[in-house]
Image: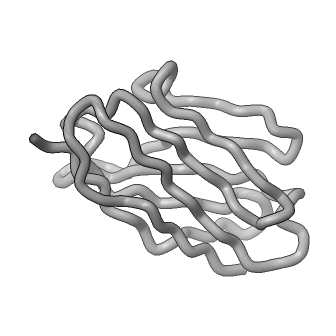
Amino acid sequence: VQLQASGGGLVQPGGSLRLSCVASGSIFSTYVMGWYRQAPGKQRELVALIASTGTTTYAESAKGRFTISRDNAKNTVYLQMNSLKPEDTAVYYCRKLSGTSIWGQGTLVTVSS
């Protein structure tokens, strides 16, 4: 399985971005998928998870602003990020948690005016 993340970029505070992560493999629908982020000088942290059932879990910092979703027909997991803040600036990684853990390559999100 390989993961390809995209959608990062430069956005002003208060703006929105949608990240996408496409997975190879034929049983994507069974995977637990997650988004993580790593800000400069900080440890990588969980942002959101989505189970095969569609059940979601969010970090406190993401609640009410970010939405994780999945499209099993497209083998894709999304992270819709609204009301972005400068402190959301980080490299965002998708991760397959089921079975062998696999990380995508990361996509940079910069929130700045």
Quarter where residue 40 is shown:
bottom left
- Residue 76 x/y as whole percent: 70, 62
Query: Which residue appears at 50% of the width and 22% of the height?
Result: 63
Relative vertical location of residue 58 with respect to residue 42 in this rendering, above or below: above
* Picture residue at 50% right of the left edge, 32% below the top: 66
Considering the image in quadrants, where does the C terminus appear?
A: top left
Would you say 108 lies left or right of 97 here?
left
Q: Quadrant of the N terminus?
A: bottom right
Q: Position of residue 57 (x, y in %)?
A: 65, 31
Q: Where is 37 relative to 55, above or below? A: below
Q: Position of residue 89 (x, y in %)?
A: 25, 46
Residue occupying the point 85% across, 63% down: 73
Count of numbered marks: 0
- Vertically, is 85 above or below 33? above
* 82 lies left or right of 21: left
**Residue at 37% from the left image edge and 59% from the top image edge:** 8
Q: How is the image coloured?
A: one colour
